[in-house]
Image: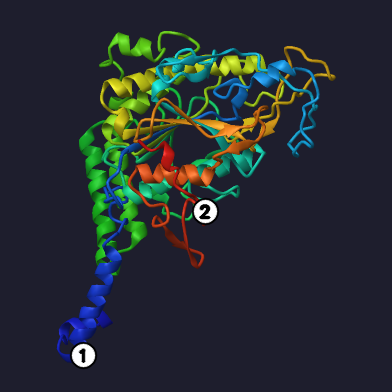
Amino acid sequence: MTRRHWLAHTATGFGGLALSAMVARDSARSAPSRTADPMAVRPPHFPPRAKSVIFLYMDGGPGQMDTFDPKPRLRTEHGQPIQLPELPTTVFNITDKVFGSPFEFSRHGESGLWVSDLFPHVAECADDLCVINSMVADHSEHTAGNYFVHTGSGFQGRPSMGAWVTYGLGSECDDLPGFVVLDSGLIPPGGMDCFGSGFLPASYQGTLFRRGEHPIADIVPVEEHEGQQLAKLDLIRKLNRGVVERLGSVSEIEATIANYELAFRMQSAVPDLLDLGGESELTKRMYGLDEDHTAEFGRQCLLARRMVERGVRFIELLTPARKGQDRWDQHQNLKSGHRINAMATDKPISGLLKDLKGRGLLDTTLVLWGGEFGRTPTAQTNGGEFSEKTGRDHNPFGYTMWLAGGGVRGGMRYGATDEYGYFAVENKVHMHDLHATMLHLLGLDHKRLTYRYSGRDMRLTDVHGELIEPILA
């Protein structure tokens, strides 16, 4: 007879008090239980503005002075030594010569927001954008930078922000994972650990949807008839439940049962998600599905909108891969490289923003655009001479990201870099601050969203992070 059974049979006096204490303790522990249904919807800390996040990850680091942060001084002093007392250490040896942006800027929308001619379609959505020109990060190397923007730490093995969001809130979608990564062809340096669950339970890691007809392995059942598959699933469920009855609640077994059942539901849900036959031709053209250079990323943006409609909590889109394309990491050939990347993403992103807004979804969907850092205002040249091959080095000291929807103010810029675009000098925004603000918009207090690990309560923002209140609508 176990101790629990003995107390149950002798539930009088001190035995009854002990049993009551055990039940109360177990109930307290199981109140926020995530074992039986890891993605069950859980209440936020306070009323949220956003229900879902779409992260448009521009892997490699777009140049802020080439996209959303115009710097006329770069044109004026092009080719001259930069007038700064000293240059910070960067990844590669670069010149001290100023590199004027090869792209033109103009104001757009009623807000007059500055946007480069790289993004004529996104410029049409200027009044929905909240452009942060004063981002700063802790790392100037891609792998550590990728870990940092995704997990709040430059070290491998920490939970991704998508894992934290689904851990905190669960998902409103029963038939798809709560955290999905849409692969357009380029997995960023650092690999799948950028989307991992770290020390959180494995159910919260990102699920990668690859390109092609079958984005997930085994999505097509091997059984000829659904009845056969249901019989197998029922047998697995009975066997696992038998173990639970003998041993009591075991989180690993409960999670396994939930994963098997989700996988079964996904075999019906994923083909339906991927079937774009019900989308109008106008919608498909808005995302650029009818053009070769925008079709891949456009399809992923359209799938992101369809996932939001189905209640998926966090969706990340990766930079598309095309011939001659090397992410946004243009140490050389910046003019052509940035142009190729912008052409592949501009129209699809614009289509996503317009489609979300037209369907009334933008107000509850937070869209985030940006990379792991920006680029230097000084040039990397071939033999010291400026040419079409001139590029820029990494720069984490002042760069740009933007947000839209989900409770942020549109048509505004926040913060500023110096006249060269090298350093953030006004209202610096650290990545921890951006993470804290994202969680706030989802109804989560970043200081209360914790997980006990290695002797302390861990969180996405570590011991840092401040809410960026001026950008909140």
Residue 235 percent across, percent down from the top left: 25, 50
Residue nearest the observer in this picture, 200 or 414: 414
Residue 48 left/right relative to 106: left
Amino acid type shown at disc 2: His
Q: Is residue 213 at least partly visible in the picture?
A: no
> Could you tell me which secondary element the residue under label 2 belongs to?
loop
Per the image, the residue denoted by label 1 is 14
The relative height of residue 284 versus residue 237 in the rendered view (above or below) is above
Task: Name the quarter where the N terminus is drawn.
Answer: bottom left
The relative height of residue 143 versus residue 80 in the rendered view (above or below) is below
Q: Quadrant of residue 70?
A: top right
Per the image, the residue denoted by label 2 is 464
Residue at 64% over, 31% down: 418
Q: Is residue 447 at least partly visible in the picture?
A: yes
Amino acid type shown at disc 1: Phe
Task: Name the quarter where the C terminus is drawn.
Answer: top left
Report the residue that reaches farthest toward the bottom.
13
Report the residue that reaches farthest toward the right.
383
**Disc 2 to disc 1, C-alpha distance:** 47 Å
